[in-house]
Amino acid sequence: MSQAAPIVVKTVAELKDAPEEFRDAVSKLVISHAINELYGAQVFDEPAIALAPTPYAKWLTCRVAMEEYGHHVRFKQLGEQIGIPAARMVPHNGKRPLSIFEFPLKTWEEFVAIKLLADLAEILQVEDLLHCAFHPLRNLARATMPEERFHAQFGEDFTAELVKTPDGKARLQDAVNRYFPYLPAFFGGSKSRNNEIFRKWGIKLRTNDDMRADFLNRAREVTARHGLTLPEHQQAA
């Protein structure tokens, strides 16, 4: 697909004058983020408060849950400003949440693995919007990024605690082994039509395969720092 003539949309008001394909692409991204931020908070972050082993861990997990719900609120507000019905920005009414949320969370070690790896994947997705041609979405990504980094650091900090004992390390490695296979598909297919359109208009910068490869390198680095390994994975089609 050829690159479109570069455009920059600085405000919500200007979006109505942008090409229809540009507007549709922006809407798809906003809907996806709104739905998945909410669903992740519901199925992972809020339930993890009860699994956290200490008051300190519960406090920080409450903060993570609060911020993830906050991300949904911000994306939903932007969506409503650009004319997306509120019903399309909640799970199942809009679109199916990502498969990474199908993992049945049951233990603290699983939640730590999720924060260590899934939030690293989310950082890459947000990074790809930091120079988005639709400035309200770019600005939202920039505001969200510090919190996403905190969530990934949360995962690394509690990983460091768990691996101090052989039993904790073994339980965390088991959680990584079971959760990691969900993650490569998070970045989408190698021949994604949506990704082509996002890049055509400068809404996103990188291919799904480029982001997936970057994620795998970062995930190997962060797990290796703590003496953990990643299982083999299937390449997305």
Image (spheres, helix red, strand yellow):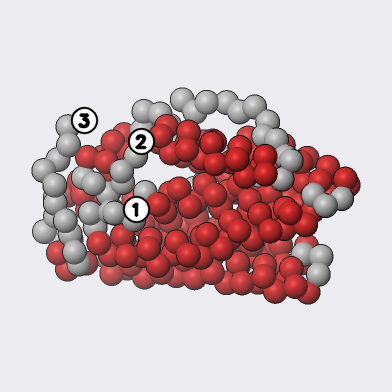
**Quadrant in which the N terminus is drawn:** top left
Q: Does the rendering let one see residue 134?
A: yes
Q: Which element is circle 2 on?
A: loop
Numbered circle sitting on residue 175? none
Q: Earlier in the sequence, mark 3 or mark 2?
A: 3
- Which comes sooner in the sequence, label 3 or label 1? 3
Hey, what amino acid is under mark 1? Leu
Q: Nearer the viewer, mark 3 or mark 2?
A: 2
Where does the image place residue 116, in percent across and percent down from the top left? Answer: 63, 51
Going by the numbered disc 2, the residue's amino acid type is: Thr
Q: CA distance from mark 3 to mark 2?
A: 12 Å
Mark 2, residue position: 207
Binning the other alpha carbons within 10 Å of mark 2 as few (below 14), some (14 to 19) or many (20 upward) gives many
Residue bearing mark 3: 1
Residue 129 numbered tag: 1
How many marks can you see?
A: 3
Furthest residue in direction front, as rendered: 225
Residue drawn at point x = 54 percent, y = 36 percent: 216
Mark 3: few, some, or many residues within 10 Å (few <14, many ≥20)? few
Answer left or right for 121 relative to 190. Answer: right
Q: Amino acid at mark 3?
A: Met
Q: Position of residue 138 (x, y in %)?
A: 31, 60
Residue visible at 42% across and 32% down in the picture: 209
